[in-house]
Image (cartoon, coloured by chain):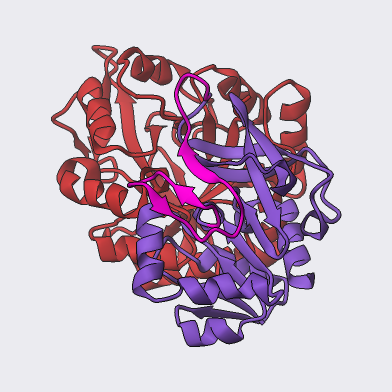
Chain colours: A purple, B red
């Protein structure tokens, strides 16, 4: 069973539809008691970093989420859900994140960015560090992005994919059992479905 | 390089999908027809985004509309834009719950701009598309903006309307040409030049709609530097595998579309 975290940040209908289309047993939850037992978790999200962490704090979910990768239960963050895996974020304040993947989340700046927000299908350069999450997905495949902040990290080993918005930015990360994708696989046509299938099969 | 987008629109009216010609509507079938006979799940694999617009005459979010959006969302894994008749935050929530990734607002930008600001704040600017219906005045040659499903002329001119969308913070601006609508005579590129000349669109993508009948129209419009996306509702021109062929031809002719 895959849990989708519902913490009031953006819509989860598209994600649920895609997972169910692939035959997954999906359950939406916002309870720490369920997360304690969860085998696999997807953290979706659209909105600001600080609001997201505040919500997780109010729902008392931070500890339960951090335990999942520790007990080898895969966690996949999508878009804002990927960003909050970082140590820190600067959207809506200067806020500690979940600290599951080293890095911080900073805004695109007009001087070096083609587009803010970065919206649309973009090619993703998949790096040799990418594991089974990108199985059967060729480097250069297109995924749908919509974001104004990006994941900056000095931990090159955690970066599994890159994309371009004027300059290169982190499109995906992995730190053992914590996975993150800046794009939306649930609305990225068949390559996106393949990535979700890979997560289901992890 | 930023990719251009091909957006496919379905118009929904009280339980049926319809085609529009100069804003007059013809029934084509229900959601089952669309999925079974039209093979929608396959067709959407060749487009960047799917729009499902409610054109219900009573201008409300109809239950059958939400139901059909939900059914289609289960077989369509590309960004989806829903709208037509949004009158409250609750309406917008219902659209997102039915599978929308973005919503589209039109007259609402002028009749209840506070609500549009709320929608942008609550769901993010990337999730709100602002649409203007325009018609070129045959005498003056100036573009007029229409509201209320094309039934009334706005008191604001084109410049003021674009400024309003900018102020409201919508993520994208869609321009729909009433005179070209459903004609298949080609898209109105002059209106894009007129809008861009106002210099107040920010860095927002411009979506052009109305009049695309054939591959050549899409190619011509997508090649325009200020057109980021073309929306077409002329579905009967794209039966069988013609949409996938069209996409491939556009890519071959140098249009920067994503390769799925």
- Occupied quadrant, residue B86: bottom left
When the figure is inspected, residue A71 is found, relative to residue B30, above or below; the finding is: below
Which residue sits at x=46%, y=31%?
Answer: A116
Give the left or right position of residue A161, taking residue B205 as reference: right
Instruction: Say if the magenta span includes residue B26.
Output: no
When the figure is inspected, residue B133 is found, relative to residue A64, above or below; the finding is: above
Residue A91 is at least partly visible in this image: yes
Which residue sits at x=78%, y=70%?
Answer: A202
Give the left or right position of residue B133, taking residue A178 as reference: left
Instruction: Say if the magenta span includes residue A99.
Output: yes
When the figure is inspected, residue A79 is found, relative to residue B161, above or below; the finding is: below
**Magenta residues (range):** A85-113
Residue nearest the viewer, comparing B51 with B12: B51
Which quadrant would the N terminus of chain A be assigned to in this image? bottom right
Location of residue A139 in the rendering, given as x and y in whole percent from the top left corner? 81, 41
- Occupied quadrant, residue A22: bottom right
Location of residue B36 in the rendering, given as x and y in whole percent from the top left corner? 68, 67
Location of residue B241 in the rendering, given as x and y in whole percent from the top left corner? 77, 47
Residue B83 is at least partly visible in this image: no
Residue nearest the viewer, comparing B146 with B168: B168
Q: For the view shown, which residue lies furthest in the left direction?
A: B155
Location of residue B150 in the rendering, given as x and y in whole percent from the top left corner? 28, 40
Give the left or right position of residue A121, taking residue B251 as reference: left
Question: What secondary structure is the stretch in magenta mostly built from?
Answer: loop
């Amino acid at each position: 069973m895959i849990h989708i975290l519902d913490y009031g940040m953006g819509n989860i209908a598209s994600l649920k539809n895609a997972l169910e289309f692939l035959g997954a047993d999906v359950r939406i939850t916002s309870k720490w008691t369920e997360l304690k037992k969860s085998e696999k978790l997807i953290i979706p999200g659209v909105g600001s970093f600080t609001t997201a962490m505040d919500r997780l704090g109010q729902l008392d979910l931070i500890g339960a989420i951090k335990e999942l990768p520790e007990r080898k239960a895969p966690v996949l963050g999508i878009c804002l859900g990927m960003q909050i895996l970082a140590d820190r974020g600067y959207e809506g304040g200067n806020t500690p994140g979940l600290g599951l993947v080293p890095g911080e989340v900073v805004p695109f700046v007009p001087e070096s960015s083609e587009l803010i927000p970065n919206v649309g299908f973009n090619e993703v350069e998949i790096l040799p560090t990418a594991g089974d999450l990108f199985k059967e997905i060729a480097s250069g495949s297109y995924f749908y992005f919509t974001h104004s902040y990006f994941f900056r990290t000095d931990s090159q080993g955690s970066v599994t994919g890159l994309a371009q918005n004027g300059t290169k930015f982190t499109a995906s990360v992995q730190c053992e059992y914590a996975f993150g994708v800046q794009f939306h696989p649930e609305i990225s046509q068949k390559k996106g479905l393949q990535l979700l299938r890979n997560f289901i099969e992890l | 390089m930023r990719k251009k987008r091909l957006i496919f629109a379905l118009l929904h009216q009280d339980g049926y999908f319809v085609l529009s010609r100069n804003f007059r509507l013809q029934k084509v079938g229900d959601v089952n027809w669309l999925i079974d006979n039209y093979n929608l799940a396959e067709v959407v694999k060749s487009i960047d985004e799917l729009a499902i617009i409610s054109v219900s005459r009573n201008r409300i979010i109809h239950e059958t509309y939400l139901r059909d959006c939900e059914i289609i969302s289960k077989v369509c894994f590309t960004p989806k834009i829903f709208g037509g008749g949004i009158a409250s935050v609750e309406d917008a929530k219902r659209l997102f719950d039915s599978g929308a990734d973005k919503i589209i607002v039109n007259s609402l930008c002028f009749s209840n701009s506070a609500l549009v600001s709320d929608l942008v704040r609550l769901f993010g600017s990337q999730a709100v598309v602002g649409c203007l219906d325009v018609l070129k005045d045959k005498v003056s040659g100036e573009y007029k903006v229409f509201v209320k499903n094309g039934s009334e002329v706005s008191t604001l001119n084109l410049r003021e309307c674009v400024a309003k969308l900018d102020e409201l913070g919508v993520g994208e601006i869609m321009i729909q040409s009433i005179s070209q609508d459903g004609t298949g005579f080609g898209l109105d590129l002059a209106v894009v030049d007129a809008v861009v000349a106002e210099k107040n669109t920010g860095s927002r993508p411009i979506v052009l709609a109305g009049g695309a009948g054939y591959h050549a129209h899409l190619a011509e419009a997508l090649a325009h530097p200020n057109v980021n996306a073309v929306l077409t509702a002329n579905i009967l021109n794209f039966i069988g595998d013609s949409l996938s062929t069209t996409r491939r031809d556009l890519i071959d002719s140098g249009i920067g579309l994503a390769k799925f």
